[in-house]
Amino acid sequence: MQKFTTLRSIAAPFARDHVDTDMIIPKQFLTTVSRKGLGAGLFYDLRYDDKGAWNSSLLLDKKVYKGAAILVVGDNFGCGSSREHAPWALLDAGYRCLIGAGFADIFYNNCFKNGMLPIVLPKQQVGQLMQAAEAVAYMTVDLPQQTVSVEGTQQVFSFDIDETRKRALLEGLDDIAMTLKEEDSIRAFEERDRTQRPWLWASP
Amino acid sequence: MAKTLFDKVWDSHVVTSLGDGVDLLYIDKHLVHEVTSPQAFSGLRENGRGVRRADATLAVCDHAVPTRRQGRAHIADEQARLQVAALAQNCRDFSITHFGIDDVRQGIVHVIGPEQGLTQPGMTIVCGDSHTSTHGAFGALAFGIGTSEVEHVLSTQTLRQKRPQSMRISVNGRLAEHVTAKDMILAIIGTIGTAGGTGYVIEYSGDAVHALSMSGRMSMCNMSIEAGARAGLIAVDDATIQWLKGRPLAPSKEHWQQAVHHWQSYVSDDDAHFHKEVTLQAERIEPQVTWGTSPQDVTHVGGFVPDPKQEEDPARRQSMEQALTYMGLLPKTKIVDIAIDHVFIGSCTNGRLEDLRAASTVIKGRKVKDGLKAMVVPGSGLVKQEAEREGLDQIFKEAGFEWREAGCSMCLAMNDDRLNPRERCASTSNRNFEGRQGRFGRTHLLSPQMAAAAAVTGHITDVRELL
């Protein structure tokens, strides 16, 4: 997994609340067997018309936001389907950090698995960052210090993050490799379980 | 210390604590489908890892499969065909049991788990699908995961999880006749909102919940995710245990008593603490219908499309306006005046036998309104088989419904069952998001009975007027 330490980038705004993962990446892109290339389907229904022609009125598609790696989002972003294609699509389109007042649980989890940082801040602070993004600004996300700052202003906001998640991002750790180190505990659990719930271990 | 049902399941599955509130949780059962698993299997291969417990894993193709019989032998959509084939190959390579497209046991992953008796009380169950919450109806902790976590479970049979908080939603009293579990959960989502359950596991309790059949309980737990909760669950009672008796994957005779005794402990202790409590009165719940593009945009059948002008919160007002524009609805329109083009009966929310029976009682002896398209997609091959044995297929077909093969179908429209732009659908599924049932398609969520009533009249109708 790619490490995440600090990130300086133009921040793109996407103010809509309750953006679901169907909207982030519609179903027709889900038949892929790869994690790559999903950026082409990002926000597809909002960007293309009935006939598949580009017709985006999204603010984030303005030229000034080209290359943005930070996306400031509305409340409850990523609700709905568990499809990890949603963070894959965002990542493929260059976004590595999302800032919002609240994310849906599964989506939030999925981001961390892909070296992406979803930052939760109080609504009022997200509102200020959204304004800054709409006015076009560089922001710096500092994961070790747990801060977001807006360049050229005094705005610096601190955010919370679980220690374990922070470490995994900073070191680019592979969850599975870490869990495999717990093999002894897993085996001990299974041995206990065989006696406590034998019906789950009976061969069919 | 007094424990909630959720605490009991969680605590009994902690392999070890990883610090910072994160536990390594043992996963009893892992359900796998074609759409969210290929990248996980590739990950295993790239890292030279295997599947730890193929015996605790069950795979089925459901999301992308066609539901027309003639389309199933050779799937026309090349990508979907490759994906379905990849699942079969991955299951062969890793020795995982797989219900293929021509297996009568094939169906929607959340219908077949309980149907086979795989879903049992006190279990942890995961699947790369947000509606895994369905299995919570059995007093199991069941939740959706992303593909990276699918790979993690395949490889380790565990997940690294932060413990969520617990919420209890009690529905007291008795539901009125023809008001269903679907109406109850839609009313709950309308009350707490689509992010109301974020960070929580919901336990549904109260007389009205325990009066539900297992099928109704599944409909409720299914839509926990639409309330923002990863999981919803219901305490074990006699109905839970009766359901399991004799199912193919239920414990054998030799272990049955021991299992039942174990299962019966999966209820919340009387004085258990919940971080949040919500109470609803069943008698006040009317048949529900959504009008917007989020499941929280819901009202009762006697109601009206709301007027955004009367909304004080500017953000909410804007999202209501957006929703009404998308839905092609004017403020203050009577819900029963909404004309529809399409009816879809099926999905992991309402694609079980009981749902089809309920819809058929409304349809029997009636006809689908001229010009309206209507389809029934049974939740599994076995549901279809049993429905046909009861003659339900004849009732639907004679009325003008299409009678299809099992799959997720128009709930998410990954196959060729989808709405045309601006077509309006009365649907028993779970999501009315923009484009969910087809690009620019418009979805109204409701119960199977209400969907059936709409099919007959051509507009949203209070089913009680037809019965």
Image (cartoon, coloured by chain):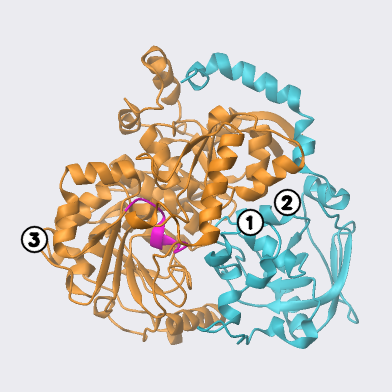
Image quadrant containing the C terminus of chain B: bottom left
- Between B280 and A45, the residue placed more toward the observer is A45
Residue at which label 2 appears: A113
Is residue B384 placed above or below B292 in the rendered structure?
above
Q: What colour has chain B? A: orange
Where residue B119 appears, as percent x and y from the top left, is 44, 34
Residue A122 appears in the figure: no
Where residue A52 appears, as percent x and y from the top left, is 56, 81
Residue type, label 2: Lys
Discs 1 and 3 share one subunit: no
Q: Residue furthest left?
A: B365
Asked if the residue at tag 3 contacts the one at tag 2, i.e. Cβ–Cβ closer than 8 Å, the answer is: no
Was residue B92 drawn as part of the magenta stretch in this picture? no
Chain identity of mark 2: A
- Secondary structure beneath dot 3 equals loop
Residue at which label 1 appears: A84
Q: Quadrant of residue A84?
A: bottom right
Q: Give the letter of the cyan chain.
A: A
Q: Which residues are magenta?
A: B405-414
